[in-house]
Image (tube, rainbow, N blue to C red):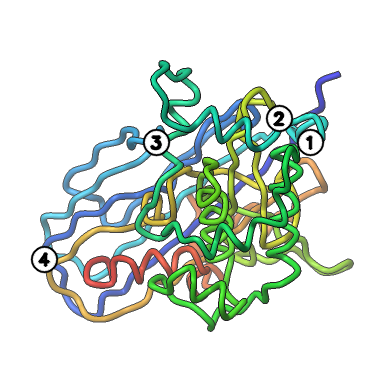
Amino acid sequence: MVEKPVRYHVVHETRYDYGSIVSLSQQQLHLSPRILDWQQVIEQHIKIDPPPTWRRDGRDPFGNPVSWIAFHAPHDHLLLRSTMTIAITPHLPENIEQSPPWESVRAHLAYDSTAPRAEDLDAMRFLFESPHVRIKHELAAYAADCFPPERPILVGAQALMAKIFKEFTFDPEATTVSTPILEVLEKKRGVCQDFAHLMIGCLRAIGLAARYVSGYLLTRPPPGKPRLIGADASHAWVSVYAPDCGNDWVDFDPTNNLLPNTEHITVAIGRDFADISPLRGIILGGGGTEPEVAVTVTPLDEEEIPAALLAALSVHADPPEAVLGKKPSEPEKMANLTASASTS
């Protein structure tokens, strides 16, 4: 029996007040959700203020929706408001014990004289180093006890996820976007991007393909407390290549030690954060500023949504101060740091 999908309304809002006039600007946006076998995009819209002089929508090299925008007129602020309605069908793997031995997957991805399968060739893009994920022998050593001989690949990945969750402390002040993985490994502290990059580096270091996934995670309020506007967050997790298991890729969330299912909403997939930061680009002019960011994820089927919350979440409603006053979530803070000479 096909399980009923879970529907969400998501609002992701980013505002820059530049402090002085910006005369020219070009930006790349990864704010539109990806269509997947288990994720249906019912509707999605990006409101941009001021309206850009030029805009083009397309796909990036990894198949993610992306928008490119340019401003050729002076402006002193930028407001981006992405709203979407998403339906997610439960998609946990049926039996991770039945996944293939990890060595056999590594062999599929290793170079030899035979022509690779199309799906293996696509996965090979996620075998190698990328800007935020260096491949070091220390990472292979850290993962070694999770991947003994003949262990099913998904069992090994789950063990590695649990190990990171147990041994590392979530600490937003411990790292920046430039903190190397080996420093994260040494300090045992970081945020969701660090844990995702670390797990990806460990998997690649032993010859397995792993992707970085960005999206949203539903934050549940305490019992009896109302759902707050802007209280949810952008999030990051890992996808592991496991041939013939579901759609060949299975997600793991090392920050929360769980396999993502209906409460994780996927926006984009890349080699690491640098490929899919929500906003990055260049500006001419402006002063130093940090963005004000808020994310609200509202389940549409769980309970009756208060009228005030519905009004605040409306695509046509003016954003409430509760939304515009929120500090950036970690992925967006990292996006801002990545492009610190540009978008901020």
State the CA–CA distance, disc 3 to disc 1.
26 Å
Q: Which mark is residue 100?
A: 2
Q: Are marks 2 and 1 in contact (CB under 8 Å)?
A: no
Pinpoint residue 228: horizontal percent, then vertical percent: 69, 66
Q: Earlier in the sequence, mark 3 or mark 1?
A: 3
Three-letter residue code for mark 1:
Ile
Quarter location, residue 49: bottom left
Name the front one of labels 4 and 1: 1
The residue that mark 4 highlights is 23
Quick one: quadrant of the C terminus? bottom left
147 vs 230, nearest the viewer: 147
Q: Disc 4 versus disc 1: distance between alpha carbons?
A: 54 Å
Q: What is the x, y in percent for residue 230?
A: 59, 65
Mark 4 surroundings: few (<14), some (14-19) or many (≥20) residues within 10 A: some
Q: Counting residues from the N terminus, which is met first, the one under dot 3 or under dot 2?
A: 3
Q: What element does badge 1 sit on?
A: helix
Q: Which mark is residue 96?
A: 1
Q: Is residue 314 visible?
A: no
| Real-space CA distance between mark 3 and mark 2, rounded to the nearest whole angstrom | 25 Å
> Disc 3 designates what residue?
62
Q: Amino acid at mark 2?
A: Pro
Q: Residues within 10 Å of mark 2 (few under 14, many from 20)?
A: some
SS under mark 3: loop
Residue 153 to residue 143: above or below: above
SS of the residue under disc 2: loop
> What type is the residue that disc 4 sits on?
Ser
How many marks do you count on the picture? 4
Q: Please determine whether, in this image, residue 192 is positioned above or below residue 173.
A: above
Determine the CA span between mark 2 and mark 4. Answer: 55 Å
Q: Secondary structure at mark 4?
A: strand
Question: Can residue 148 be seen by looking at this rendering?
Answer: yes
Query: In the image, residue 231 lies at what x, y percent?
Result: 64, 67
